[in-house]
Structure formats: C-alpha cells, structure tokens
Image (cartoon, grey):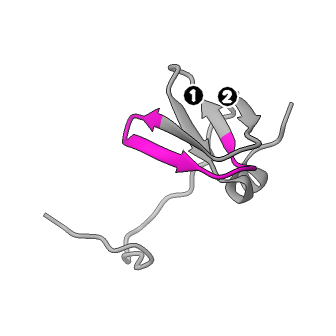
C-alpha cells in the first residue's frame, strides 16, 4: 500500500480534468452549524455554505472555497 502525504504531490503522469457542471443547492449560513455528512459530523462557521449534493447528501463548504469554486445562478 502506498501512503501519500498532503502537500507532497508524487511524480506521476497526471491528466487534466474539469469538474462537470452539476448544480447543487446551497445556502450561506448566518451562524455556526453542525451537519451529519457521509464522513461523520462536520462543523461549519458563520458565513460558510450548507450544500446539498445530487443524492441529497449535505456538507459544509467554507466561504473561501465556495467563492473560488462556485458561481450562484
């Protein structure tokens, strides 16, 4: 088994890919929150987004990541 460490990208022949434009539901939360995700309970801060994926799964998304990754429709 290979162990890969965060921030140490191995010298593999990586391909480029673009994430499919799949709309998700989201709301910017005005207070800190906890949400049960597929990975367990995760906390979000005030200003973070609560996301609902294509299969109804919920997860928090930090505002900074949301702003870099998503455009509101």
Indicate which disc, 2 or 1, sits on the residue closer to the N terminus.
2
In the rendered image, which quarter contains the C terminus?
A: top right
Q: Are marks 2 and 1 in contact (CB under 8 Å)?
A: yes
Q: Nearer the viewer, residue 45 or 37?
A: 45
* Residue 3, image quadrant: bottom left
- Percent x, y of residue 15: 50, 58
- Percent x, y of residue 38: 39, 35
In the rendered image, which quarter contains the N terminus?
A: bottom left
Q: Which mark is residue 53?
A: 1
Image-based side of 42 in relation to 49, left or right: left
- Percent x, y of residue 8: 40, 79
Label 1, secondary structure: give it.
loop
| Residue 38 lies in the magenta-colored region | yes
Q: Which residue appears at 29% of the width and 70% of the height?
A: 4
Q: Which residue appears at 75% of the width and 44% of the height?
A: 70
Magenta residues (range): 36-49
Query: Going by the picture, which residue comes out furthest to the right?
Result: 73
| Residue 56 lies in the magenta-colored region | no
Q: Which residue appears at 36% of the width and 76% of the height?
A: 10
Label 2, secondary structure: give it.
loop
Residue carrying label 2:
24
- In the image, residue 14 sits, relative to residue 37, either above or below, namely below
Image-based side of 69 in relation to 4, left or right: right
Q: Which mark is residue 62?
A: none
- Percent x, y of residue 7: 45, 77
- In the image, residue 13 sits, relative to residue 71, either above or below, namely below
């Amino acid at each position: 088994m290979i162990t890969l460490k965060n921030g140490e990208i191995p010298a593999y022949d990586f391909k480029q890919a673009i994430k499919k434009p799949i709309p998700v539901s989201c709301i910017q939360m005005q207070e800190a929150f906890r949400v049960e995700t597929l990975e367990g309970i995760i906390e979000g801060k005030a200003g973070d987004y609560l996301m609902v994926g294509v299969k109804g799964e919920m997860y928090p998304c930090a505002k900074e990541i949301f702003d870099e990754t998503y455009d509101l429709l």
